[in-house]
Amino acid sequence: MTTYVILLNWTDQGIKSVKESPKRLEAAKAVLSQMGGTLRAFYLTMGAHDMVAVAEAPDDAVAARFALTIGMGGNVRTQVMKAFPEAAYIEIISSLG
């Protein structure tokens, strides 16, 4: 499984119905699970982003489909970053000429 860091911000619609956000989170977890992935961690954050999630998905296409699916609800905007684990990081850096 590939790890993804997902940065989320509420839209105007999403913040107006923020009390429903925990239910939307549970629905998003179920959607990702149905796609073969898992939401490993979720954080409410302060600063440039309202929330941060760490997810695992079988591939980039699933991660993209998940982000698009939750975005279609109109409550959040997402930025998805592929995350390389430490071993992959070391391998990548070691391969530099």
Image: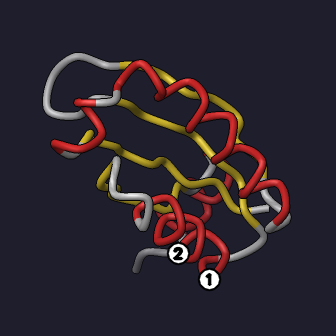
Q: Where is residue 48 in the image (x, y as percent from the top left)?
A: 14, 32
Task: Answer with the quarter of the image where residue 45 lies.
Answer: top left
Q: Mark 2 points at which residue?
A: 64
Label 2 – label 1 distance at C-alpha: 5 Å
Q: Name the residue at 67% across, 75% down.
A: 62
Q: In terms of depth relative to the viewer, which is nearer, 56 or 65?
A: 65
Q: Position of residue 72 (x, y in %)?
A: 42, 67
Q: Where is residue 3 in the image (x, y as percent from the top left)?
A: 64, 54
Q: In this view, does 18 lie to the left or right of 39?
A: left
Query: Is the C-beta separation of discs 2 and 1 under 8 Å?
Result: yes
Above or below: residue 75 compared with residue 45: below
Task: Answer with the quarter of the image where residue 63 lies.
Answer: bottom right
Q: Which amino acid does label 2 sit on?
A: Ala
Q: Name the residue at 51% across, 37% down.
A: 53
Q: Could you say whether the residue bearing mark 2 is in a helix, strand or loop?
A: helix
Q: In this view, does 63 lie to the left or right of 13?
A: right
Above or below: residue 55 compared with residue 31: above
Task: Answer with the quarter of the image where residue 23 lies.
Answer: top right
Pick the quarter of the image with the N terminus: bottom right
Q: How crowded is mark 2: few (under 14 residues within 10 Å), some or many (20 or more)?
A: few
Q: Is residue 74 left or right of residue 91?
A: left
Above or below: residue 13 compared with residue 93: above
Q: Mark 1 points at which residue?
A: 61
Above or below: residue 96 compared with residue 78: below
Q: Could you say whether the residue bearing mark 1 is in a helix, strand or loop?
A: helix
Q: Which amino acid does label 1 sit on?
A: Ala
